[in-house]
Image (cartoon, rainbow, N blue to C red):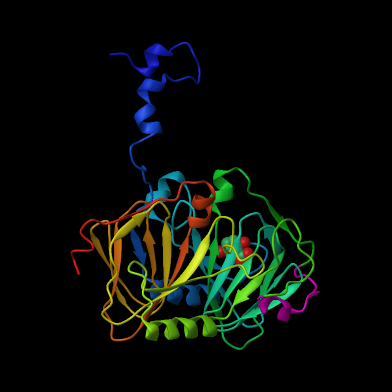
Amino acid sequence: MTTASTVTEYLENVVPLWEVLKGLIPKEPAKLVQPYRWNGKEIIARLRQVAKEIQVGENVERRVLVPVNPGLKVVGLYAATHTIYVGFQIVLPGEVAGAHRHTPFAARFMIEGKGSTVVDGMKVDFEESDYVVTPRWSWHDHTNEGSMPAIWLDVLDIPIPRMLHATFFEDYPQEIQPVTLASSLNVRPKVAPSVWQKGETPAFIFKGREVIQVLKEMSKQGTDDPFDGIALTYVNPHTGGDVSSTLGTSISLLKPGMKTRAHRHTMSVVNYVVRGRGFAIIDGRPFPWDQHDILVVPPWTWHEYSNEGNEEAILLAITDAPMLQRLGLYREEVHPESFQAR
Ligand code: GTQ
C-alpha cells in the first residue's frame, strides 16, 4: 500500500491529498467539543472560598473559575466550546480588577450582587441578571462599590481570535481608567455617544429586570418557539445587529412542564441557568440542570430541553451563530421524530 511516508518521503512537509482528504473534508463536522454540564453551585461555592485565599492583583489579573470542555483539553483550549469561553468571576467589595484591553469580545451576566465596569471611560453599573457588552479592544476595569461580593459570568470569544491568530492584549498604564462618559448614555436604545472608535460600538447594557418582564409578558401570550420556548435575542442597540460579530446571546423562558422539540445546528451553545431546573437530552444523553449550571450543546448535535420544575425556568444562551451566519456556514435541521413525539 502507498502511504504518505513513501509518496512524499523526500518532500518535507508535503502530503498526498488522497490519503488525507476524508479527514480534511469529512461528510459531517468532526467534533472535539463534548456535550457537558457543570454544576454552577459547586463552582460558585469554590469561588467564594478562593476569594478569601487569593487576592486580585499583579499575579491574579482576574479571579475567575473557567469551565473547560473535556474534549478541548487535548488541544489546550480552556473554553466551554471551540468558540465560546465562559468564566465565573468574583469581585469583593472594595476590590479593583485593573484595566486592560484585548481583541477578544467580552460580555458579563451578573449572577449575584452589584458591580461596575468602566469600558473606554464609560462607567456601567450592573446588578442581578443585567448583561453588559464590552466591545473588542476597549479598555475595561471592574470594581465593586457595594457591600456584597459581585459574582458574574464572563462571556468571551477567546477561541476565535486565537484560531485566527489575531489575539492581542495590553495592560492599561494605570490601575484604573478615568471615567469620562456618562453611564446613562449607554442604556438609551436610540442614542449613542458620538465616539464610535475602532469600528466597535460603545459598551451597552441590558437590564435583566426589563428583559425578564418581557419574557413573562410573552409567556402569557403563548408566543412559544418550538425549539427554544419563549425566546428573546439581545440586539446591539447602536446597530440593530448581533451583540458581537462572532457571538450572539438570547434568553428563553420555559414554562413548567414545557418540552422543546429536538433539532441540531452548526452553532454551538453555552447555556447558563438563570433560574429553574430541568432536563436536557443532548446527543441522546440525559443532562439534568439546575440554577447556575452551565450546559454545552456541541455543533451539529441533537438536543432538546424540558422544564421539570414547578416554576418558570430561564436559560441564557450564548451562541456562535453570528459568525457562522456571516461566513455562510449556518445550518440547522429538525429531528425527524421530534414532531411525532408530541
Ligand atoms: O474581566 O477582563 O473571564 O480579560 C477572562 C479574561 C475576564 C476580564 C475573563 C478577561 C476578563
User: What residue is shown at x 68% (from left), y 79% (from top)?
Assistant: 188
Which of the 4 quarters of the picture holds residue 74?
top left
- For the question of whether residue 112 can be seen, the reply is no
Name the one closer to the observer, 75 or 185: 185
Q: With respect to residue 108, does 330 lie above or below? A: above
| Location of residue 159 in the rendering, given as x and y in whole percent from the top left corner | 53, 51
Quadrant in which the C terminus appears: bottom left
- Magenta stretch mostly in which secondary structure? loop
| Location of residue 250 in the rendering, given as x and y in whole percent from the top left corner | 48, 69
Direction from residue 96 to residue 301 in the image, left or right = left
Q: With respect to residue 110, does 311 lie above or below? A: below
| Location of residue 223 in the rendering, given as x and y in whole percent from the top left corner | 38, 77
Quadrant in which the N terminus appears: top left
Which contiguous range is marked in magenta?
175-189
Name the one closer to the observer, 24 or 332: 332
Direction from residue 205 to residue 341 in the image, left or right = left
Q: Tell me if residue 225 is in the magenta stretch.
A: no
| Location of residue 157 in the rendering, given as x and y in whole percent from the top left corner | 55, 56
Q: With respect to residue 26, does 106 lie above or below? A: below
Total labels drawn? 0
